[in-house]
């Protein structure tokens, strides 16, 4: 059996927090406790305006800069190494959907300056840039094509989660750096519009990208948050993409008192009927599941190098190629 080092490098490509300036970021201690080294924290999604996204970003920056004993706002990969060597959690931000630009491409560089290192193009519904996974299947618009070039130029990781099929394939085809699905599970294990087909997974991997395993129980099965089911998704991703193109993006909300379902039911346009969003008490797997995942991978005979890749080094490789 593979022997793992005591502490492997762990990259969680997406937190599932509901972005708000009022959010108490003490919640991020959950990731520290579970030995995560880097976390991408979402500061906006298409339901929010540019103003609300900027207000959230400002509040999160101020809080993190006041808590540098535990957290480090990472601008480059060496910052993540520094955080790791000093026992802190490295954090940068992501934005889910281009409504945060307010129609202005100049905002891409501003967001980069403020610590955003990953952006996806459309959150479930179509917007001015791209197509979402719960809407008519469209490729990137001209505005979307221009945004992609600007993201490649300033150094923001290109994320295709939440987008529709044509937009995701368009992104993979056109991007100058590898494209990731930061938090998406395979449709071939559980049929859901938020999940992605084997063809999308293969295309992502063929261009050097990584797919992050999602822990939300309605994307894994019938509100199924068991380790066994999570491992089925992980192994399927590994079988399709290869072990160098799979990572973790748990989409995790640690506060179990939050009823995710009630938030989702409040906006049926973004979270449409028939997609299990009306499930009461949606379950959730987060980074506390990592030991189970490692055990499963070891039992499957995977090498230490492969497991290290999945826990963090694969996403770090894409960051090295994207964060210019
Ligand atoms: Zn998401």
Image (spheres, helix red, strand yellow):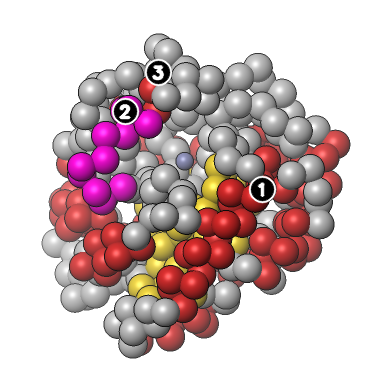
Looking at the image, residue 300 lies above or below residue 320: above
Residue corresponding to mark 3: 275
Q: Secondary structure at mark 3?
A: loop
Query: Quadrant location of residue 227?
Result: top left
Q: Residue at x 30, y 65 (%)?
A: 26
Residue 190 against residue 35 in the figure, above or below: above
Q: CA distance from mark 3 to mark 2?
A: 12 Å
Mark 3: C-beta under 8 Å from nearest atom of ligand 1: no
| Residue at image location 32% in from the left, 79% down from the top | 70
Which image quarter: residue 123? top right
Q: Is residue 260 visible?
A: yes
Which mark is first along the chain, 2 or 3?
Answer: 2
Kind of element beneath mark 2: helix
What residue does disc 2 label?
Answer: 261
Q: Which marked residue is nearer to the observer: mark 3 or mark 2?
A: 2
Q: Which residues are magenta?
A: 253-263
Identify the residue at horizontal 50%, vertical 81% (top origin).
Answer: 79
Ligand 1: does it lie within 8 Å of the C-beta at label 1?
Answer: no
Counting residues from the start of the chain, the first of labels 3 and 1 encountered is 1
Q: Is residue 208 visible?
A: no
Tell me the tag on residue 50.
1
Q: Give x and y (percent) for residue 238.
A: 38, 44
Left or right of 180: which side holds 190?
left
Q: Quadrant of residue 152?
A: bottom right
The residue tagged with tag 1: helix, strand or loop? Answer: helix
Disc on res. 156: none
Callouts 3 and 1 close, C-beta under 8 Å: no
């Amino acid at each position: 059996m593979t022997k793992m080092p005591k502490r492997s490098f762990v990259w969680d490509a997406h937190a599932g927090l509901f972005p708000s300036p009022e959010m108490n970021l003490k919640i991020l201690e959950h990731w520290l406790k579970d030995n995560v080294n880097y976390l991408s924290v979402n500061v906006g999604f298409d339901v929010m305006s540019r103003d609300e996204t900027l207000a959230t970003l400002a509040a999160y920056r101020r809080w993190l800069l006041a808590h540098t004993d535990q957290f480090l706002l990472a601008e480059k990969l060496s910052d993540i190494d520094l955080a790791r060597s000093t026992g802190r959690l490295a954090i940068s931000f992501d934005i889910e959907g281009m409504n945060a630009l307010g129609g202005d491409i100049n905002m891409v560089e501003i967001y980069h300056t403020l610590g955003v290192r990953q952006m996806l193009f459309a959150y479930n519904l179509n917007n001015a840039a791209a197509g979402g996974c719960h809407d008519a299947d469209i490729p990137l618009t001209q505005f979307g094509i221009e945004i992609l070039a600007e993201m490649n130029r300033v150094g923001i990781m290109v994320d295709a989660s939440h987008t529709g099929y044509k937009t995701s394939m368009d992104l993979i085809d056109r991007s100058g750096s590898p494209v990731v699905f930061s938090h998406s599970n395979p449709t071939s294990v559980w049929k859901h519009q938020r999940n992605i087909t084997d063809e999308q997974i293969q295309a992502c991997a063929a261009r050097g990208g990584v797919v992050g395993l999602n822990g939300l129980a309605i994307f894994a099965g019938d509100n199924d948050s068991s380790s066994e089911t999570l491992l089925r998704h992980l192994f399927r991703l590994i079988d399709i993409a290869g072990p160098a193109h799979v990572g973790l993006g748990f989409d995790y909300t640690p506060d179990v008192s939050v009823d995710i379902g009630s938030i989702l039911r409040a906006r049926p346009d973004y979270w449409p009927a028939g997609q299990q969003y009306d499930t009461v008490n949606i379950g959730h797997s987060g980074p506390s599941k990592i030991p189970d995942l490692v055990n499963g991978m070891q039992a499957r005979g995977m090498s230490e190098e492969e497991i290290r890749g999945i826990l963090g080094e694969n996403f770090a490789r894409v960051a090295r190629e994207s964060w210019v």
